[in-house]
Amino acid sequence: AQKITQTQPGMFVQEKEAVTLDCTYDTSDQSYGLFWYKQPSSGEMIFLIYQGSYDEQNATEGRYSLNFQKARKSANLVISASQLGDSAMYFCAMRDNNYGQNFVFGPGTRLSVLP
Amino acid sequence: DSGVTQTPKHLITATGQRVTLRCSPRSGDLSVYWYQQSLDQGLQFLIQYYNGEERAKGNILERFSAQQFPDLHSELNLSSLELGDSALYFCASSPGTGSGGAKNIQYFGAGTRLSVL
């Protein structure tokens, strides 16, 4: 069964606008971690933000924030004030103890920022 | 720069050959992970080593093997290569075993792009 779902294969956003990238996950574990990574066209995987399942506050890192809704099993990434350099693939990933504590990645969302 | 170093950046080889990909983790990180990213399979976890010992196995083929050396660098060996092995291979590292909390953040190298002709 697919563990991570990213329903938006591609997204467009105007420069300086905010954008939300969706991620839903499936786990029966109570302790898990959720991660977002960015992959620009150059290919490297860049860590953006982390949310633990027991964290009460939504994670924030600069222009990135994670809208964590545990009951709905969603962990959406919000990018504020989009920049041209934000154009990339974005992957949601989960670590849970039922999967050997290793990462499962979603299929990704390609974000294009328009000038 | 994540601090994880992978060499080579690109590798072109022929079917049936064997190659070795190398990874140096971030300073102080004890865990090394290998992933394969292909167009049809997405990002797949292959194997994890922690402080020299195999910790977890994912979708790694029997033709593939890995090890982590005492200096904590790791090598991924791919043998009897097939066209379908063409992919981007990532190494990642983290401080701990991967068992929870912020210690479990994995930092990725730039990847090795393997082309099998």
Image (tube, coloured by chain):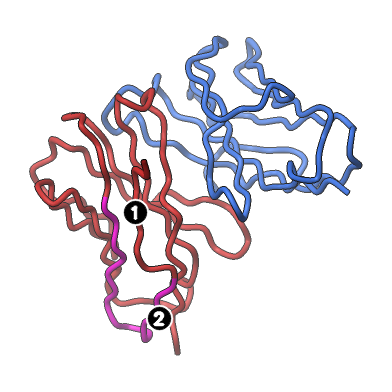
Chain colours: A red, B blue
Q: Position of residue B78 (x, y in %)?
A: 76, 29
Q: Is residue A106 above or below residue B92?
A: below
Which residues, given as a range, are shown in magenta?
A10-24
Badge 2 local density, few (<14 within 10 Å), some, or many (20+)?
few
Query: In this orientation, which residue lies closer to the viewer: A74 or B108?
Result: A74
Location of residue B4 (image quadrant): top right
Query: In this orientation, which residue lies closer to the viewer: A60 or B111?
Result: B111
Label 2 is placed on what type of residue? Phe
Mark 1 and mark 2 lie on one chain; the one further toward the N terminus is 1
Label 1 is placed on what type of residue? Thr
Q: Is mark 2 on a helix, strand or loop?
A: strand
Q: Which residue shows up at 45% across the image and 90% down it?
A: A115
Badge 1 local density, few (<14 within 10 Å), some, or many (20+)?
some
Query: In this orientation, which residue lies closer to the viewer: A101 or B40?
Result: B40
Q: Is residue B81 above or below residue A51?
A: above
The residue identified by callout 2 is A12
Residue found farthest to the front:
A1
Q: Where is residue A23 in the image (x, y as percent from the top left)?
A: 29, 56
Q: Which residue shows up at 54% across the image and 13% down it?
A: B54
Location of residue A94 (image quadrant): top left
The numbered disc on residue A55 is: none
The numbered disc on residue A5 is: 1
Check the residue under mark 2 and report the chain it is in: A
Q: Where is residue A34 in the image (x, y as percent from the top left)?
A: 29, 43
Q: Is residue A88 in the magenta section?
A: no
Q: Which residue shows up at 48% across the image and 15% down it?
A: B55
Residue found farthest to the bottom:
A115
Q: What element carries label 1?
A: strand
Q: Which residue shows up at 70% across the image and 27% down it?
A: B76
Magenta residues: mostly which secondary structure?
Answer: strand
Q: Is residue A12 in the magenta section?
A: yes
Q: Position of residue A2 (x, y in %)?
A: 37, 45
